[in-house]
Every structure is written in structure tokens, then in C-alpha cells.
Amino acid sequence: MRPGRLKWLITVKDTTVRPTDVWLCGYMKSGNTWLSEIVSLIMADGVVDRVTDRPISERVPNIFNSPDNHFNCDSFKKLTDPRITVNHLELKYLPRFEGKEGKMIYIMRNPKDVCVSLYHVHHMWDNSPIDWDDFCQLFLDGHLMQGDWLSHVTDFWLTYGTGNHPNVLFIAYEELIADSAAMIATIARFLGKQFTAETVANITTHCSLQTMRDNPMANQSDLITRFGKPGAQFVRKGTIGDWRAHMTDTQSALFDERFGQQLRAIGLHVCDDLASAETVMRATGRFKH
């Protein structure tokens, strides 16, 4: 890591969170780009024309990893309010979100699908990709560059998910799949927006995975052009359970053993399929169908 980026990483924790800030957090490939597009359009009051002139990497910059690698403390301070930023950093590197100082949305996804999606990203960037079995084991052991998935989600959950933290919202990727409109309305209310059903429907259509996949302002095509392999897609399948096409029964069992018991112990539910996502949403009052 270059000294300048290390200094910025250390500085992030002491960054002043403005009351109008929206910080999007989550382990890499948990639906972060999808959430970024949704929140960007929500903060634009659902007016699509206001989010079509700049790529998502500019509208919702990654607080630590920018396309030109020059994003730093001064860059972040100069962003106009409301600032929306996304990151994959561990909790220990972030400022505290207490009281009314800004909003945080944490998105999580089934670790099996996260692993598969990360594997494809690794192949998209790396000219000497590791094979699936080795990659899967590295994910299980928490030895990927992105860090340990379990530590990432549990740290955020135990800090903000189990108490009274009205400025922090936890959502699941699978919930967005199960009922995008209901989840968009939930996120909008959390951000202080009250939209008509028509506006929610427009946001849902614009932010559908198929629309995003074809939208150069939302599909990270600027990053792919600069760093990815020809023909690569950052927004890939966007489904629940793609891990079943990659993992052996033994690998799936290892994931259940590695993550299942600890997640249950802290009351954090991971959605395995559409039905379990709908069950969670009914329990929280988010499911409308």
C-alpha cells in the first residue's frame, strides 16, 4: 500500500461525519453498487435525469478506493452536501455513527454468493487468477485481500444492529431481490424521503439489475475500461443462490460450519433463498406483497 493511501486510511476514522452524510458500508460484492445507484437516485428525489450525467463512481465515490487513486481527505471534504460515499472498510477504520450525525446503511449478502461473486471479480481484474477451490478456501480462512467476511459483518452488527441506532440501517441483498420496491421505499423513509408509489416504481425500474447492467453510468464500465479484461461485466448475474453452480456439497457444508453457528449466536440471519428473504421482510414489516 502506498504511504499516501495508508495515511488516508488512518485519517478516515477521524473524518468528521456531516449531518447530511450517507455512508454505504458492506463487504465487497454484497450489492454495494446496486445500493449506491438506489441511494443516489433517492437523494435526487427520484428524478432520473439528475443521475444520468455522471458515472456512479463519481456520484457515490468509494471513500478509500477511487478510480484515479487520488481520492483523499481533502477530496472528501470538498464534496458537496449531501455527500454519499461507499466503502468496504472494516468497522475499526470508520468514524462512529452516533446520535444524528449522518446516516449509515450496511448491506450484507449470503457469504456463499459473496465468495462466488468475488471469485469472478478476481478473474476480471487478475491476469493470473487463482482456481476456484483455492479461492474458496482463502475466503473461508479470511485470507483474501478484503479481509474476513465474518469479522466484517459481525463487528458492524454487534455495534449497530443490536441496539437503538436510528441512524443506521441494515439491509440484505436478498431483500432487494425479493421486493425491490418495498426495500426502496424503506431506504427512502430512512433517508427522510416520502415518495409516491409512482416515484418508487420509477426508481425500481431505473435501478433494476438488467437496467443497471446496460447503463454505462451505473455498471462501473469506466472502471472496467481502465482495469478490467475485455468483455468483463461488473454487474453480473445478480441472483440468489448462484453458489449452487460452483460449490461442491463439501464446500457448502464448510461454509455452514464456518459461519452458521456464530451468526445464529448473535441473532444475525443470512438469507439462503427468496423464501427466507421474504420471511425476514415479513418479520420486520418490510414485505408488502
Image (cartoon, grey):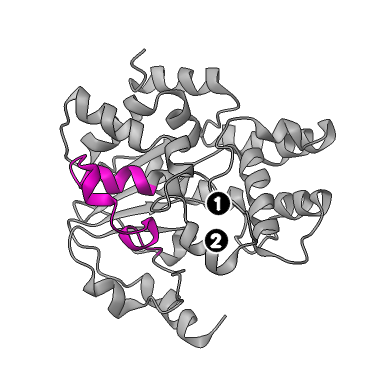
Callouts 2 and 1 close, C-beta under 8 Å: yes
133 relative to 124 in the view: left or right? right
| Of residues 99 and 227, the one drawn nearer to the viewer in this rendering | 227
* Displayed quadrant of residue 212: top left
Q: Which residue lies furthest to the top in this view?
A: 289
Q: Per the image, is 50 magenta?
A: yes
Horizontal and vertical percent for residue 180? 38, 28
- Describe the element under mark 1 as helix, strand or loop: loop
Counting residues from the start of the chain, the first of labels 2 and 1 encountered is 2
- Give me the residue at 66% from left, 39% from top: 112
Horizontal and vertical percent for residue 22? 27, 53
| Of residues 275 and 200, the one drawn nearer to the viewer in this rendering | 200
Mark 1 is on which residue type? Phe
Q: How crowded is mark 1: few (under 14 residues within 10 Å), some or many (20 or more)?
A: many
**Region in magenta:** 36-62
- Return the residue at label 1: 234
Horizontal and vertical percent for residue 93? 44, 66
232 relative to 209 in the view: left or right? right
- Describe the element under mark 2 as helix, strand or loop: helix
Q: Which mark is residue 224?
A: 2
Q: Residue furthest bottom?
A: 3
